[in-house]
Image (cartoon, grey):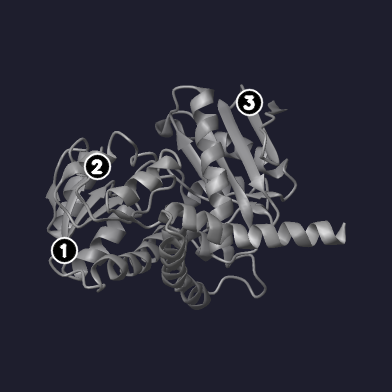
Amino acid sequence: MLEITDIPVAGYENVKRAIDSETGLHAIIAVHSTVLGPALGGLRLWEYASEEEALTDVLRLSKGMTYKASCAGLALGGGKSVMIGNPGMKSDALFASMGEFVESFGGSYITAEDVNTKPSDMAVIAKQTDSVVGLEGKSGNPSPKTAWGCFLGLKACLEQKFGSADMKDKVFAFEGVGSVGSIYAKLIAEQGGKIILADIKDEAARRVAEETGGTIVSPDAIRSVDCDVYAPCALGGSVNQETIPSIKARVICGAANNQLLDENDGVSLRKHGILYGPDYVVNAGGLINVYNELVPGGYQEARALDEMEMIYENLKEIFEISTQRNICTSKAADLFGDRRIHAARDLVSENA
């Protein structure tokens, strides 16, 4: 039987845990904000060391989704969900139970695939709730679109730092070459970029190295290799006070969520002369893609791709804010996202 309990968290609209002893489900859904619309964010399955670790992750991720949706101009709020467990122990019963949990939010939270979950898992969830996107036959797997959005964001970053978006002979260090990172790396390699990569899965690293002509290094070494661009495409927190001094890249532009461990890391990057492409702006392509399932007329790939072009434009504006206000790009991105959030809140207050 599914047992759902509240987890009160200041600054978040709704955070709950669900435990089902029969299926083994232990999950948390965090809704950060629905000011701009229902909270949409993927479902991550990870073998967290504790519920506390899982809660920290889901809270950071859900807040990031609020800003990702706002910066992308979408009528969505921010939410996220995590399942605590071994990714090798998936079952339909587990995802059916998760579907019940999602349904309990009454449409205020919409889920999608994320780390260690797939469209087939979302199909099981969809039997229990309509609050799910990214299904086969609709927008499908968002990973290629996330990678494409990162590629567009990379062009803006390269132009800002080097004066040109030319990737030929530039060196790109990829931390993580999973479903998004592998495609992102191949897009760059097709433009003549040189790939250095690392992944905790040896097979994935070898495959992408063969496909891109890339060089493999250990996960411990990837952040400190000589390169033009460091692309974090694994889990978050890889850019922090311990790693920043060893980063030799002049640009950071990756697909991972929450790349900065805390807000001071953005300031440190600026001091070190490293241009940071704020993650929730750069990696918004997947969200833009699945959002298009929810708009009138249903999913249209051409429309979604057109909307992704805003990633490039938004980064240009964020870099301008950073320069004008003499602040780091992560703070500039927060200010950019806050514009729509604050305007929506003010409108609600006026109509109350």
Classify 108 as above or below 298: above
Q: Nearer the viewer, residue 71 or 106?
A: 71
**With 145 as the anchor, is 105 left or right in this view?**
right
The numbered dot on residue 20 is 3
Quarter of the figure that contains the C terminus: bottom right
What residue is shown at x 52% (from left), y 32% (from top)? 56
Across and down, in percent, residue 326 comes to 42, 58
Precedes in sequence: disc 2 or disc 3 = 3
| Total marks placed | 3
The reply to whether callout 1 and callout 2 are in contact (CB within 8 Å) is no
Mark 1 or 2, closer to the camera: 1
At label 1, counting other C-alpha atoms closer than 10 Å, the crowd grade (few under 14, some 14-19, many 20 or more) is: some
The amino acid marked with disc number 3 is Asp
Quarter of the figure that contains the N terminus: top right
Residue position marked by numbered label 2 in the rendering: 199
What residue is shown at x 68% (from left), y 58% (from top)? 342
